[in-house]
Image: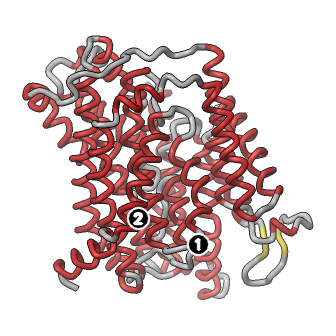
């Protein structure tokens, strides 16, 4: 298939009226959720995932991808105007964005964040288009041992890149792997950890876990924070959204560097938007002639992390769509969206479902343009939205989570699971555990179990089969190094 055929197939799917409408809906909802601090894209996608159960697979996934991209765009608004990140990925933007707003330059800060996001997002989508067939071609040579090694490597990278304690991260991975095997064994048909509850025979649904950990718990966390300190909206009216020529001159290298760093980090399992934004900001500060000015309102401090956030977003689709390996909680939910419709992401997706594969990618180009058109003209609406008291917003978010959980299977068990995991998520926040690790492990558990059991079936139960597969052996070696690297760095610090 040549590139002309690929472009024709992609835009023929992306530019249908229905798919344009749902790309717009996803982009609008994602931006709205990004502006409102507290719920985030993971809980939003989990909440709306049941809406994609019926209807066209591509249309549903296009809406979910639009939500993901829109959230990354919209979260910078709150960071700049209120000094509260709409999502964790924009936390680093608060440092210079809020200071720019205090100096009366909120407009240029918002403008460069939106335009830098558009440039970086377009760059990552071009790289996604070019590299996806290459990665899929590599995946054709992978068997069960290689996929087992890749799954283990993905989990080990996620642990190594976690921000907290390595032991707590390993605990979350272990608990998530156990939760992922609840249900009926697909080979022996025996019940595992169902405790006689019929609704658990199909396993714990990913949507209730995500809505609890990231939706209900965020309501509790945000309400607690709002009781301690009510943030005041700094700017009542935005003027001069378009950056000046000097702003562009100062920001051009930061956007370029952020796009490249963000894309590379987005390819790594566990390399999410938070890490990408922080790495880009740190790199930009190190090469600056005036690093002491960062944190005082430097426009580069807004452009670099916002570009990196959006570049990492596009890059995360490569391992998902070519290997079937989710690198972030949002990618895990998109994987669930694929599997609900009987579509298995991986190297055969581009061959068996070219319309879905290229249609989803090219719809992101459309969503990226929609997001740029939404963010700047509607900024005055987002400002008014930020004036709504938390006491009104969060009961509605809680209601949507519970109603959404019930509508999945019309079961109160699902509602109970959401409340349970919401309480667990709140406790995890209080004791510095990372809920994202738990969710990713729940998703990876069936993938790892299936590939591992297929591998052992091929070898008659002999684990030495990995020694005869060099790629799988490399993955295992990298996994061991990734797990040991945090301990090695701590040991070096102790020696110093």
Element assignment for label 2: helix
Mark 2 or mark 1: whose residue is earlier in sequence: 1
> Which residue does the image show at 48% across and 14% down from the upper left?
232
Horizontally, residue 343 falls left or right of residue 347, namely right
Of the pair 224 and 479, the residue shown nearer to us: 224
User: Which mark lies nearer to you, 2 or 1?
Assistant: 1
Q: Tell me: residue 457, above or below residue 209.
A: below
Q: Where is residue 176 in the image (x, y as percent from the top left)?
A: 68, 55
Packing grade of label 2 (10 A; few <14, some 14-19, many >=20) is many
Locate residue 158 relative to residue 7 in the image: left or right: right
> How far separated are the C-alphas under marks 2 and 1?
26 Å
Residue at image x 38%, y 82%?
A: 140
Counting from the top left corner in percent of width and height, residue 340 is at 59, 72
On screen, 46 above or below 82?
Answer: below
Q: Give the colour scheme shown.
A: secondary structure
Disc ID at residue 76: none
The residue wearing badge 1 is 54
Considering only vertical position in the picture, is 386 above or below 255?
Answer: above
**Which residue is at a point 65% across and 57% down the rendered structure image?**
207
Q: Give the image quarter of residue 454.
A: bottom right
Where residue 485 appears, as percent x and y from the top left, is 47, 45
Give the camera-side residue of 160 and 335: 335
- Residue 319: give its label: 2
392 versus 294 height, above or below: below
Q: Judging from the image, what secondary structure is the residue with disc 1 in?
A: loop
Single out the residue that lies furthest toward the top: 103
- The image quadrant that residue 354 belongs to is bottom left
């Amino acid at each position: 298939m040549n590139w002309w055929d690929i472009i024709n197939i992609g835009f023929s799917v992306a530019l249908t009226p229905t798919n344009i409408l749902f790309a717009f809906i996803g982009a609008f909802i994602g931006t709205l959720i990004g502006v409102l601090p507290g719920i985030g894209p993971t809980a939003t996608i989990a909440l709306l995932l049941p809406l994609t159960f019926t209807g066209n697979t591509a249309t549903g996934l296009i809406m979910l991808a639009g939500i993901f991209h829109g959230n990354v765009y919209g979260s910078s608004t709150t960071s700049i105007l209120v000094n509260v990140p709409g999502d964790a990925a924009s936390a680093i933007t608060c440092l210079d964005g809020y200071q720019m707003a205090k100096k009366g330059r909120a407009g240029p800060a918002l403008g460069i964040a939106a335009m830098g996001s558009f440039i970086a997002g377009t760059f990552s989508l071009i790289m996604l288009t070019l590299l996806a067939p290459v990665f899929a071609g590599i995946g054709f040579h992978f068997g069960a041992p290689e996929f087992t090694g890749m799954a283990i490597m993905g989990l080990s990278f996620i642990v190594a890149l976690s921000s907290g304690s390595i032991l707590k991260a390993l605990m979350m991975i272990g608990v998530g792997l156990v939760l992922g095997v609840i249900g009926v064994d697909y080979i022996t048909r025996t019940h595992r950890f169902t405790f006689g509850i019929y609704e658990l025979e199909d396993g714990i649904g990913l949507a209730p876990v995500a809505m609890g950990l990231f939706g209900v718990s965020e309501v509790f966390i945000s309400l607690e924070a709002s009781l301690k300190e009510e943030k005041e909206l700094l700017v009542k009216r935005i003027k001069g959204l378009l950056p000046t020529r000097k702003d562009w001159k100062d920001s051009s290298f930061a956007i370029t560097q952020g796009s490249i760093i963000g894309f590379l980090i987005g390819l790594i399992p566990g390399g999410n938007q938070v890490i990408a934004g922080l790495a880009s900001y740190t790199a930009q500060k190190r090469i600056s002639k005036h690093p002491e000015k960062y944190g005082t309102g430097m426009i580069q401090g807004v452009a670099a992390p916002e570009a990196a956030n959006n570049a990492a977003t596009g890059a995360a689709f490569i391992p998902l769509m070519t290997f079937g390996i989710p690198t972030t909680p949002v990618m895990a939910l998109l994987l669930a969206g694929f599997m609900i419709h009987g579509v298995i992401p991986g190297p055969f997706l581009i061959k068996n479902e070219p319309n879905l594969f290229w249609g989803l990618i090219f719809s992101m180009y459309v969503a990226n343009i929609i997001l740029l058109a939404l963010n700047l003209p509607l900024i005055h609406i987002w400002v008014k939205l930020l004036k709504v008291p938390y006491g009104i917003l969060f009961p509605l978010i809680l209601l949507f989570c519970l109603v959404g959980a019930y509508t999945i299977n019309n079961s109160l068990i699902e509602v109970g699971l959401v409340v349970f995991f919401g309480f667990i998520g709140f406790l995890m926040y209080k004791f510095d555990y990372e809920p994202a690790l738990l969710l990713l492990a729940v998703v990876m558990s069936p993938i790892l179990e299936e590939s591992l059991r297929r591998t052992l079936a091929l070898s008659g139960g002999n684990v030495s089969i990995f020694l005869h597969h060099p790629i799988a052996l490399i993955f295992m070696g990298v996994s061991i190094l990734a797990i040991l690297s945090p301990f090695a760095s701590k040991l070096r610090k102790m020696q110093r």
